[in-house]
Amino acid sequence: MTRKQQAITSREVIHASAVLDVNSHTAFSKFTDPREIRAWLIDPFGGGTVDIEARAGGKFELFWNAPGGKQEGTPGCTITVFEPPRLLGFNWKGPTEVADPMNRGDPLTHVTVTFVPLPEGARARTAVELVHSGWGSSEAFQAGRAYFESAWTSAFGNLESICRRSGRARGRARRGAEGPRVKGRAER
């Protein structure tokens, strides 16, 4: 997989991007299927629970286990845009250390994710672009932005790693006694 990951910030937005070795439908499901999102965004950060209703207006609530038996999460967050497999939007909250004013804002910060299929070549690949916007100019908002700049960079690294591993696993599963096969266009 060609690795293209970055987090570029300004006062207003966070941009994170990755090129994943999966088709756009699979990439979209990495953000909307509870089992898939747990693998890269919940479990690597201490585990927790996911409650996603994959539709516009549906829940987008993620919870991480925190020290002392507490949970941090995104209660009340919803999917604002749902256009599989190309566009997803949801509002977003922050953990306790950046909750004020992030979790009390009206509106909350917002995340938009686009999924762009890349020319296939030998395998499917998808460019995933995330924009996290809605940051105010206060010092507290800027602390939240800094927190999520780091968090999205780490999370996208996990996502890329999982897609890279699953791509290798699919490659091994396709090889039989006759050795590697190249799938034809109709078999994809």
Image (cartoon, rainbow, N blue to C red):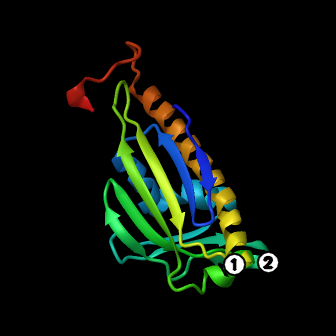
For the point 55% across and 38% down, which residue is it? Answer: 4
Type of the residue with mark 1? Ser
Q: Which residue is at the front of the view, 38 or 99?
A: 99
| Residue that protrudes farthest toward the left in the picture | 186
For this view, does 25 lie left or right of residue 65? Answer: left
Give me the residue at 69% from left, 57% from top: 150
Q: Nearer the viewer, mark 2 or mark 1?
A: 1
Identify the residue at the far top of this view. Answer: 178
Tell me the residue that label 1 is attached to. Answer: 138
Q: Position of residue 141 (x, y in %)?
A: 67, 75
Where, by quadrant of the figure, is residue 54 drawn?
bottom left
**Residue 160 drawn above or below residue 113:** above
Most foreground residue, 87 or 68: 87
**Pointer 2 residue:** 68
**Image position, residue 58 (x, y; %):** 38, 76
Of helix, strand and loop, which one carries label 2? helix
The amino acid on which the numbered mark 2 sits, given as a three-letter code, is Gly
Q: Does any portion of residue 53 appear in the rendered image?
A: no
The percent position of residue 151, horizontal first and vertical second, equals 66, 59
* Rendered location of residue 8, percent (x, y): 61, 52
| Numbered label attached to residue 27 | none
